[in-house]
Structure formats: structure tokens, C-alpha cells
Amino acid sequence: MDNAVFQNAFYVGNAFNFILYGVELVLYFQTMQILLKSRRAEMKTPDRFMMVFSTALLFLITIYVATESILGEEMWIVNAGYPGGSAAYLQAYASAWYQTMGTASGILLQLMSDGLLIYRCLVVWNDRRILILPCFLWLAALGMGAVQLYVDGSPNGNFFVGIAAQVGVAYTSIAIGLNVVLTSLICGRIIYHGRQSGQYLGSASSSTYYGVVAIIVESAIPYTLSGIAFVVAYALNSDLTIFFLSIYVMFTCLSPQLLMLRVASGRAWNRDTTSTVTGMTFRRSSGAVTVAWVQSQRPD
């Protein structure tokens, strides 16, 4: 944290925050346009939920991007002559109220995103027993997130140093472990059914629900991969940790927003899709294959 690598990583991370924030704005307004334009006459509870959830994601990521930008401005511009330099300023003001607010927004984003993935896991698997481990990890992340927020907000608290860093490693390990579990469950389920249906329906017919894009978006792979990169760098006390943290927090917003857009567009897995896939029957006669297929209806 005392060297130029950390400071440059912080600066580049802030730059990526703004780039990805622009992507989030585009995804958000596309989602709202679909929900408000095409479904205005038949707005249902799931549609209202998507609107509220997407707006909450945008609100929280706005807080995070703003607080990181304020810290950079205060550290590099307003207090450029601070005794000891920017590293000393960061150490002294890492627990400033706006930084605590930014930490809170990041934790809430993680809990909301993983809560959505837990629900999507239920949709894809259609079996509540599969949620036992994810729900346990989510509750553990909730508890450790509260501890993390308290430690970071305490006087002289610093996410990268001391007890706050130790708590941070524990919290992020649990949270990202949850990401890995959920992504693996969703991804594995989609690939399994994709191979089954592809044999009988052809790749063109099954690509909407089982293609590469479907797997990446439905299982939030970018969210999980960025989290793994972050927690590894964090555990190793790397000077690049702050950069990977920025990317990870941005994807706690972008991945669920992409999923919301896919649901609003009617291309995401839903309970009808799951019932259709598990209910397909195949009859072989004279070397031919007949498929009993019930088309899925409007997504959840």
C-alpha cells in the first residue's frame, strides 16, 4: 500500500469503475425500456421486482463509484501535500464516513447479487434441497459482512491492513466461495441439459437456453472469476488487490443486471423451461426420434 504499484492500481481501478459504470447505465435503461414499454399493459409482480431490484443495484453501485472517486480526489489532488504522501493520507482516512458508506454499498451488492443467484439456482434446479449449502454460506457472508463493516468503520480501520484485513479475507473467502458454488451448480445444470436437448433438438433450437451466452449470463461467470482474482490477490497481500476489488464490486452489479435484462427479454431460464426440459420424452421407432416438447411460456 506504500508503493507506486498500489497507487497506480487504485487509479486504474477508478478508471475502470467509470467505464463499467457506463456499461451498467446502458444495461439498466435497456431493462427499464423493455419492462415499461412492452409490458406496461400487463405489468406483474415479477416485473415490478425487476424494476426495484435493478434500481437498487444502480443506486448502490453509484455510491461505490462516487466514494472511491472522492477518496482519489482527496488523496491525490486536495491533499497532495499531506505529510507522508498519499499512502499516509489513505492510512489516516481509510475509515472516513464516505468510505464506510462505500464499503456498506459493496457488501449490500454482494448479498443482493448472491441472493438473486440463489433464486436462479432454484429456478434452474427446481429442487429446494440444492439450496441448503448456498443459503448457509449466504447467512455466513451476511454475518461476516456486518463484522467487516464494523471493523472498517472503526477509528484507524483499514480494509488492507491489520484486523480489518484479516476479517476481510474471511468475509471475501466466504462470499466468493458462495459465488463458486452457485456458478458451478447453475453452469453444470445448464450444460447437462444442453447436451441432452442438443442431441434431439439440434444446436440451433437449444442455443437460446444452452448456448455460451446463456451459460455465462445465467451462472454469472464474470462475477465469480473477478471474485476469485480479487480474493487471491487479497490473501497474498498484493499491491494489485485494489484493482481487482474495483472490478469485482462492479461485477456484483453488472452480472445481475445482465441477468435481469435477459429475463426481461424473455430469453432466460424460468420454471417452465425447467419443467419442459425435465419433462421431455423421447420415443425411438424405426431409427427416428420423436420429441414430446411443451414450449415454455413467459419467463419468471
Image (spheres, rainbow, N blue to C red):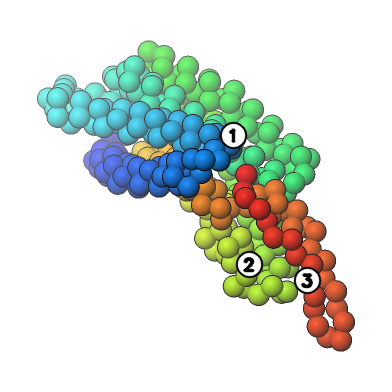
Determine which of the numbered discs, if any, sits on residue 45 in the image.
1
**Mark 2 packing: few (<14 Cα in 10 Å), some, or many (20+)?**
some
Q: Residue at x 75, y 53 (%)?
A: 275
Q: Nearer the viewer, mark 3 or mark 2?
A: 3
Tell me where residue 88 appears, x and y as whole percent: 24, 24
The C terminus sits in image quarter: top right
Q: Residue at x 25, y 27 (%)?
A: 70
- Kindly identify which residue carries mark 2: 206
Task: Decide which of 269, 255 is in the foreground and name it.
Answer: 269
Q: Secondary structure at mark 3?
A: strand
Outermost residue, front direction? Answer: 41
Name above or below for residue 19 compared with residue 160: below
The amino acid pointed to by label 1 is Thr
Name the image quarter holding residue 165: top left
Task: Decide which of 159, 186 is in the foreground and name it.
Answer: 186
Outermost residue, bottom direction? Answer: 286
- Kindly identify which residue carries mark 3: 291
